[in-house]
Amino acid sequence: EVGSSSLAMAEPEAGTKTSAPKPEEEPTSKKQKMALPQAPDEEWPESWMMTEDEIKDQRHLNRQDPNVPVTAAMLRELGICYWKLDADAFEYPVKAVPWDPKDAVDPKLTQLRDDRGYSYADIITIHPDTLPGYEEKLKMFFEEHIHDAEEIRYVLSGSGYFDVRDKKDKWVRVHVKKGDLMTLPEGIYHRFSCDEKDIIKAMRLFKGQPVWTPFNRPCDEHPSRKVYVNEFLDEKKE
Ligand code: KMT
């Protein structure tokens, strides 16, 4: 092995006794562009454990009493990612299907799209005036389900709740607002609800051709659920 590594060949006097090898410098041609860093913990959306009582109004906070906050670290452990963008600094259409992600005017959004390979985007405004079949869709969004791909939502205005199941299968409510770009991993049980403001405009991004099909719970045998359980819930990883 001696002398066969590129490190040994890079030493000024090969074969002479040297101290510990110097840290290797990355060749400039191979320098990777840093991926857009996720937001610091204090900027993550406010999240809490939901009440276990029957839900009377899904638009209410539905917190426990006293409130049980959920930290950014706990959300990350469930596979959630989060970036904060400046949604006021750029203009996006009210509705566009599809809206070409190459038209992204925000350089951070462009970087995120390139880092993560998002190739599709559209904009959905959840409000009775803008969403055909509003009531029916809201019911569908609030049914507990998974997708067979990552769910990526960038909130351009308004606000709402993504509820996700934690490691103990309890509901965590994540309150997303303008500027929040959040991803939910493939196979996580989740649902969406408007909050009391009753309006949210969000960009939906996707890798490849979008597939919105929800698989309602129970679907523990679905391959995407198995991927999620294996990656985030399996005990052996604790
Ligand atoms: C979904 O998949 O649940 C939705 O697209 C609705 C939420 S978008 C803010």
Image: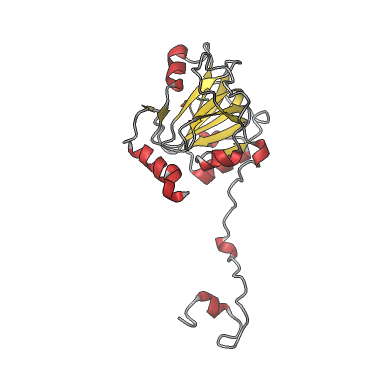
In which quadrant of the rendered view does residue 76 lie? top right
On the question of residue 129 being in view, the answer is: yes
Q: Position of residue 229 (x, y in %)?
A: 40, 41
- Residue occupying image coordinates x 54% and y 23%: 51
- Residue occupying image coordinates x 53% and y 37%: 102
In which quadrant of the rendered view does residue 147 lie? top left
Nearest the eye: 1 or 235? 235
Which residue occupies the extreme front position in the image?
A: 66
Nearest the eye: 31 or 69? 69
In the image, residue 193 sits, relative to residue 46, either above or below, namely above
Q: Position of residue 143 (x, y in %)?
A: 42, 22
- Residue occupying image coordinates x 49% and y 15%: 131
On the question of residue 109 being in view, the answer is: no
- Residue occupying image coordinates x 52% and y 11%: 128
Q: Is residue 142 left or right of residue 18?
A: left
Q: Quadrant of the N terminus?
A: bottom left
